[in-house]
Amino acid sequence: MVLSAYAELDLAAVTYNLTRIRAYAPKAKIMAVLKANAYGHGLLRIAKVLADADAFAVARLGEGIALREAGITQRIVVLQGFLDREELEFHIRYGLEPVIHSPFQAELLEQIPSAEVVTVWLKLDTGMHRLGLLADQFAPNYSRLQNCPAVRRPIPVMTHLANADVVQDTFTGQQLDRFNSALHNLQTECSIANSAGVLAWDGTRSGWVRPGIALYGVSPFPGRTGPDEGLKPVMSFRSRLIALKDLKAGDAVGYGGEWVCPRPTRLGIVSVGYGDGYPRSARTGTPVLVRGRRVSLVGRVSMDMISLDLTDCPDAQVGDEVTLWGKGLPVEEIAQHASTIPYELLCGVTPRVKMVERWE
Ligand SMILES: *Cc1c(COP(=O)(O)O)cnc(C)c1O
C-alpha cells in the first residue's frame, strides 16, 4: 500500500535516548514523561518500549488509567493530580500517584479514611508559578499530609523549572536554592529536572529526573538539535509527491496567491497539510527533504497539501517520498520556520497520520 502522510517511529532510538539520559544522570531514577500521547508518538507504544524506565509521568488521570488498563505496572505519576473526590478515588483504584499542588487536594485526602492507600507527590512552586504550593504553604501542607492516614510516608517532593532551556539564565539557580531551602532537612524522594535540567544543570540530576522531549530525540535548547545532545530523533514525518507542474515566472501559487514564481518554476505538490499536523504557520522557505536534497516550501500550507519549489531538484518524480521532519531534517529547524517549538509540532500530528514502527 502506498501511504501518503505517515510518521515513521524509530523505536530503537527511544531506548537509545533513555540510555543517553541515564549517562547524563547516572545516579538518578528516571520518570519518563508520556503526556500528550507521548508527545504524539503513542502513549502505550512508548510506555511498552520504555520497559526500563523507573516510572512514568502523565499530565492527566485518563492517561494514567489508559496505561494501567494496558497492563503497565511501573509507578505512574499524574502531574495535574485530582480535581475532586471522584478523581482521587480513581487514582487510588488504579494505583496512580497524584501530584498535590493545592491545599484543596490535601483537604480531599483527609476525607479518605483508609490507611496508607495512596502515594502522593507534593509540588513546591519555586518560581514557575503554574502548579505548586507557594513557599509559605509548603511546610504546613507537608505536615498536614504527613498526618493524613491515607497518605504513604515519607512524601516525595517535586518542583518544575521554568527557564532551564536557557543555559545562561540565573533563574534556575534561584529555583534550586528555593527548593533546597524548603527541603533542608526532609529525608524523602525529590524530583526537579526536566530534559533541559538533565542535559545542562548539575544540581538537578539527583533523585528522580523527568525527561520528556529528550526521550523523543529532540533538544529542549533553542538553536540546538537532538543529535547535538547525542540523541536520536524518533519521529520522521513523511509523505509523497503527488503532482509536478511547470509554471511561468509571475504565476501565483496556492490560496491567496501569496507566492509568485520569480522564474520559470518546477512546482511539486506533497500530500500533507495542516490536517495532518504540518503547521500552517510554516513560511515560504521552510525546508523539505526530497531525494536527500533540501528544497523550499512555497506559498500557504493547505489542509491536505503543500507546494514545493523543485526547480533545483529536476530529477524529482511523482511518488517520491519526502521528509517533512525527522532523520536528516531536524524538527527543531521546522519549528523555527513555523515560529513554534518542536514540542508543539510533535504532539500536533493528527490521528489521520498513520504511525509506522521500525526498529533500526
Ligand atoms: C512536560 C513536563 C516535563 C518534561 O519536560 P521536557 O521539557 O519535555 O523534558 C517534566 N515535568 C513536568 C512537570 C512537565 O510538565
Image (cartoon, rainbow, N blue to C red):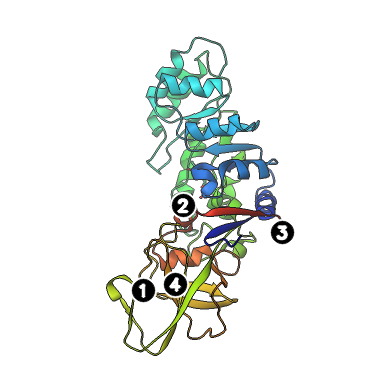
Q: Which of labels 2 and 4 is toward the front?
A: 2
For marks 1 and 2, give the CA distance: 22 Å
User: Could you say whether the residue bearing mark 1 is in a helix, strand or loop?
Assistant: loop
User: Could you say whether the residue bearing mark 2 is in a helix, strand or loop?
Assistant: loop
Q: Which residue is mark 2?
A: 350
Q: Quadrant of the C terminus?
A: bottom right
Q: Nearer the viewer, residue 158 or 307?
A: 307
Q: Earlier in the sequence, mark 4 or mark 3?
A: 4
Q: Which of labels 1 and 3 is toward the front?
A: 1
Q: x and y percent of residue 173 in the render?
A: 48, 49
Q: Residues within 10 Å of mark 4 (few under 14, many from 20)?
A: some
Q: x and y percent of residue 61 in the render?
A: 48, 31
Q: Is residue 143 visible?
A: no
Amino acid identity at mark 1:
Gly
For marks 1 and 4, give the CA distance: 10 Å
Q: x and y percent of residue 30 in the render?
A: 63, 41
Residue 284, above or below 327: below
Q: x and y percent of residue 357 in the render?
A: 64, 53
* Label 2 within 8 A of ligand 1 by Cβ: no
Q: Which residue is mark 1?
A: 299
Q: Nearer the viewer, residue 326 or 318?
A: 318
Q: Which residue is mark 3?
A: 360
Res 83 → quadrant: top left
Q: Earlier in the sequence, mark 3 or mark 2?
A: 2
Q: Which residue is mark 4?
A: 286
Q: Which of labels 3 and 2 is toward the front?
A: 2
* Label 1 within 8 A of ligand 1 by Cβ: no
